[in-house]
């Protein structure tokens, strides 16, 4: 789907890469090296880009050296964290890729309720360390998601209703700037940069480490969760019930709604394999002696095909969907924010959800309410805090021959649903969709983001992202 516009071997040949090698503790890979194709591959197999150099950084000093080298030799810079990236913007043709995946240390201070996380971590690394202490940092819904990408885009997840977005729990960040400086950004130091990092994406520098607040969850890290599934024909009834129920639920209980095909694997009953469904994945993080009371409305509604609610470690819920979506599948994404789930929108969901093109294609609506909606929309760069939902439509399949099928279904679904949205989208779910879509995704915060971009990256060194232009 992606065409090559540079010749990476020629780019590598024209720059003095032997000047960069001795400055790195990590390794430097060129198109001539046997591991090149493996290292340039990203989670979304629709993306096929050929960078000139891939630097597997081991520490912040490696990142500093890479940024300075790229600026000196006029190379594009692409920053790769540990996870997914819908649009494949962790790599670029002819670029120097600053690959952080070897930077994966995690350090928890339980008595202070904080965790320090390097920029190449995935959330499984963080959850492994914090949940053992009965704590968690608000993150996403999939353990293989990268800490850096999710955080810089905002961070919507199971704990959003109770503890806010990931960016609401960011204490500080170590950032390599476009001029090669390494700075600490927090409320007291580079506060404008700290504001912009909390939702503004990778536009302002390379974050080599994050420090987050942690919070108690469940009982010693054990929560109650998993999906409740209904037949696809019940979608309208389920969505109307869900939209009315959710705002009044205790914030210890959250649930996101999906249209999906029931996977052909345990623990789902074999007679349901391959059946299209409307599902809500619930997560209750409060005291277990209140669980029956809190979960009663969830268990008792409608005629579910599956009621999967049971105690489990939070790590198990976070990683439950990883086996269904391994790296290397074909993905095509479209997204929007919604302030309501209207009856007209429900009609669109039912029509296109009934036409899911492959077993892994799906639609999700993630709530942004509770604690997240009590933060002012200009308090962080992430602006959509009106108590609505972040929606995403994804066409997914392992077969490259189905790429056009996935794309066509996703676009048609989005075209019909977009008029019922509030305009912008969660940047972590966006493909390369142009400057207007990026601007719409920040509402009134875009102009301030542009000013911060001008202050910290006036030459737009960090542009391989959902780009915010200098003002």
Image (cartoon, grey):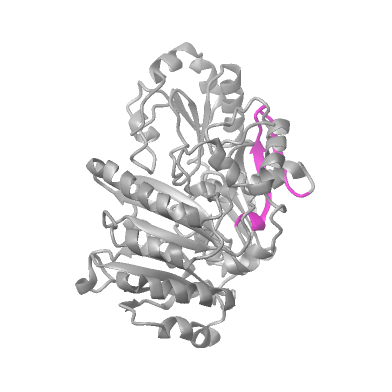
Image spot of residue 397 (x, y percent) = 28, 49
Q: Nearer the viewer, residue 362 or 233?
A: 233
**Residue at 41%, 86% in the rendered image:** 300
Quadrant in the picture for residue 183: top right
Identify whether 253 is placed above or below 377: below
- Furthest residue to the right? 188
Image spot of residue 469 (x, y percent) = 63, 32
Quadrant in the picture for residue 460: top right
Q: Nearer the viewer, residue 471 or 11?
A: 471
Identify whether 460 is placed above or below 172: above
Quadrant for the C terminus in the image: top right
Q: Is residue 56 left or right of residue 354?
A: right
**Residue at 69%, 55% in the rendered image:** 377
Quadrant in the picture for residue 298: bottom left
Is 275 magenta? The answer is no
- Furthest residue to the top? 14
Region of the chain picked out in magenta, as a range: 166-187
* Residue 123 visible (yes or no): no
* Residue 292 visible (yes or no): yes
């Amino acid at each position: 789907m992606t065409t090559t516009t540079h010749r990476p071997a020629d780019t590598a040949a024209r720059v003095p890469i032997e000047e960069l090698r001795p400055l790195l503790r990590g390794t430097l890979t060129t198109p001539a090296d046997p591991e090149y194709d493996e290292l340039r591959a990203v989670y979304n197999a629709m993306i096929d880009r050929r960078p000139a150099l891939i630097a597997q950084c081991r520490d912040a000093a490696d990142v500093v050296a890479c940024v300075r080298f790229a600026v000196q030799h006029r190379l594009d810079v692409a920053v790769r964290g540990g996870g997914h990236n819908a649009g494949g913007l962790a790599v670029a043709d002819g670029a120097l890729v600053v690959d952080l995946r070897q930077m994966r240390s995690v350090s928890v201070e339980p008595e202070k309720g904080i965790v320090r996380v390097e920029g190449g971590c995935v959330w499984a690394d963080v959850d492994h360390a914090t949940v053992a202490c009965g704590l968690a940092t608000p993150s996403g819904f999939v353990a293989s998601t990268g800490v850096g990408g999710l955080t810089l885009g905002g961070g919507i997840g199971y704990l959003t209703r109770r503890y806010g977005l990931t960016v609401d729990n960011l204490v500080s960040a170590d950032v390599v700037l476009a001029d090669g400086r390494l700075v600490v950004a927090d409320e007291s130091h580079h506060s404008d940069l700290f504001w912009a990092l909390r939702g503004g994406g990778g536009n302002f520098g390379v974050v080599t480490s994050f420090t987050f607040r942690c919070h108690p969850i469940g009982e010693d890290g054990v929560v109650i969760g998993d999906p409740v599934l209904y037949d696809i024909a019940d979608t309208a009834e389920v969505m109307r019930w869900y939209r009315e129920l959710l705002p009044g639920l205790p914030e210890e209980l959250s649930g996101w709604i999906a249209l999906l095909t029931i996977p052909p694997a345990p623990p789902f009953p074999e007679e349901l394999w391959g059946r299209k469904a409307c599902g809500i994945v619930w997560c209750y993080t409060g005291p277990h002696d209140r669980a029956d009371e809190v979960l009663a409305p969830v268990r008792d509604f409608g005629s579910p095909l599956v009621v999967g609610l049971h105690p489990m470690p939070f790590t198990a819920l976070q990683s439950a969907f990883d086996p269904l979506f391994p790296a290397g599948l074909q993905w095509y994404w479209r997204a929007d924010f919604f302030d309501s789930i209207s009856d007209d929108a429900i009609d669109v969901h039912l029509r296109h959800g009934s036409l899911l093109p492959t077993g892994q294609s799906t639609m999700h609506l993630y709530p942004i309410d509770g604690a997240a909606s009590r933060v002012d929309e200009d308090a962080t760069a992430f602006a959509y805090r009106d108590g609505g939902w972040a929606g995403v439509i994804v066409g997914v399949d392992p077969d490259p021959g189905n790429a056009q099928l996935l794309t066509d279904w996703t676009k048609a679904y989005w075209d019909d649903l977009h008029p019922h949205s509030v305009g912008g989208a969660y940047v972590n779910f966006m493909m390369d969709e142009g400057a207007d879509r990026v601007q719409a995704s920040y509402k009134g915060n875009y102009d301030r983001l542009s000013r911060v971009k001008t202050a910290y990256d006036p030459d737009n060194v960090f542009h391989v992202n959902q780009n915010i232009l200098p003002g």
